[in-house]
Image (tube, helix red, strand yellow):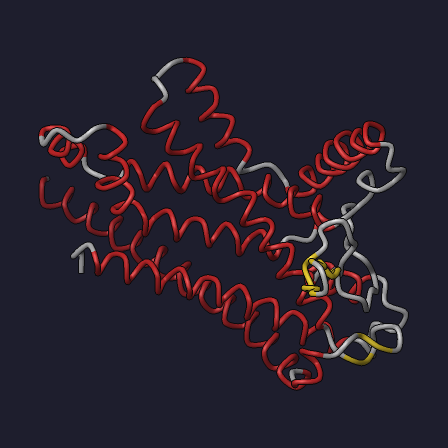
């Protein structure tokens, strides 16, 4: 009887392992097929002119440099807004906040926000940042319609709100992964709470924080829906740059108040609203390949930094 039960258990276990194995290889094959098709169709469009030139002839010719520049500008401002706020909020929640009903509600709300569809964040950005804050600033400062219109700043702020729950959750997980005994040892040596966080907790949690943050940023850089209403332009050959002049010296700076081109939005427009979708098809695949390459670069950066930080901690 025991042998029969053990035999049935082995059959179920072997079947489960094969099901998991088949699903894994199916996922890998689908991913390779998708990336392979994009690479095969888009590699022919990649050239120096394609990367650094402006779109021409109703975006059926030329390059995508304004879209690449706009994507990088939005991502940089998103990082400045989301990462410090997310990491500091997670440190407070994990290390300083008491385990109360309010704290649990906040944690649950953050987890739920991570699953909200991205288009909802776009509508939130339009209503809160542009119509409420922007128009309010225009009324108070009497500047006319300056802040209350779609712009690079509001798109970046909306994407920052989108990735903020991911940054907080990944930071919380990284902080919780630090053993309690290490904190106790630090307190036993007479260190204060902040000294323990700064010198013991954060160095050990840094690889996890960095990995989660960069993965969140790569997701934000590839989002299209949140910026549909927030300043992404169909065709804008001019870069969102203005000169900051101090005396006789002028420095070109990113102007957050300007509209911009965005790589993911550029691909969406080419695929859905182009006057000649067939002629623009190589540009669609080329732009998609560039966007995937940028995302991969971010992920590879996260892997390299995680490896170095773990190595510095002696975990390898």
In the image, 94 versus 1, the foreground residue is 94
In the shown orientation, is residue 241 left or right of residue 23?
right
Q: Is residue 109 above or below residue 37?
A: above
Residue 270 position by quadrant: bottom right
Q: Residue at x 69, y 47 (%)?
A: 153
Q: Position of residue 214 (x, y in %)?
A: 46, 54
Residue 137 image point, x, y percent:
78, 32
Side (left or right) of 206 relative to 124:
left
Q: Residue at x 49, y 44 (%)?
A: 83
Q: Is residue 32 above or below residue 299?
A: below
Query: Which quadrant does the N terminus fall into?
Result: top left
Residue 87: percent from left, percent from top? 43, 39
Q: Residue furthest front?
A: 247
Q: Nearer the viewer, residue 87 or 262?
A: 87
Q: Position of residue 249 (x, y in %)?
A: 69, 65
Q: What's the residue at 50%, 30% (across, down)?
A: 110
- Answer with the quarter of the image where residue 141 lies: top right
Q: Is residue 75 above or below residue 92?
A: below
Residue at far top of view? 101
Residue at image position (18%, 33%) is 183
Instruction: Compare residues 265 and 277 and report the one nearer the observer.
Output: 265
| Direction from residue 13 to residue 24 in the image, left or right | right
Looking at the rendered structure, the number of numbered marks drawn on it comes to 0
């Amino acid at each position: 009887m025991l042998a029969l039960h053990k035999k049935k258990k082995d059959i179920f276990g072997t079947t489960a392992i094969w099901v998991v194995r088949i699903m894994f290889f199916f996922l890998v094959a689908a991913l390779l097929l998708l990336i392979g098709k994009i690479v095969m169709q888009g590699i022919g469009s990649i050239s120096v002119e394609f990367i650094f030139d402006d779109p021409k002839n109703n975006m059926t010719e030329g390059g995508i440099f304004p879209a690449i520049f706009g994507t990088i500008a939005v991502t940089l401002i998103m990082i400045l807004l989301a990462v410090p706020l997310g990491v500091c909020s997670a440190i407070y929640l994990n290390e300083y906040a008491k385990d109360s009903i309010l704290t649990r509600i906040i944690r649950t709300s953050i987890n739920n926000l991570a699953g909200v569809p991205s288009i909802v964040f776009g509508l939130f950005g339009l209503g809160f940042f542009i119509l409420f804050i922007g128009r309010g600033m225009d009324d108070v400062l009497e500047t006319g319609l300056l802040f209350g219109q779609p712009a690079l700043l509001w798109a970046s702020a909306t994407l920052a709100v989108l990735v903020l729950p991911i940054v907080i959750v990944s930071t919380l997980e990284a902080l919780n992964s630090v053993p309690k005994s290490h904190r106790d040892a630090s307190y036993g040596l007479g260190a204060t709470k902040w000294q323990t966080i700064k010198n013991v907790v954060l160095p050990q949690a840094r690889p996890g924080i960095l990995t989660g943050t960069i993965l969140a940023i790569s997701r934000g850089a590839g989002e299209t829906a949140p910026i549909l209403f927030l300043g992404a332009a169909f065709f804008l050959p001019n870069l969102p740059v203005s000169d900051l002049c101090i005396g006789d010296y002028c420095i070109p700076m990113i102007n957050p108040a300007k509209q911009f081109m965005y790589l993911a939005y550029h691909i969406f427009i080419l695929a859905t609203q182009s006057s000649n979708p067939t002629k623009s098809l190589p540009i669609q695949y080329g732009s998609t390949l560039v966007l995937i390459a940028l995302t991969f670069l971010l992920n590879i950066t996260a892997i390299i930094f995680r490896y170095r930080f773990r190595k510095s901690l002696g975990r390898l």
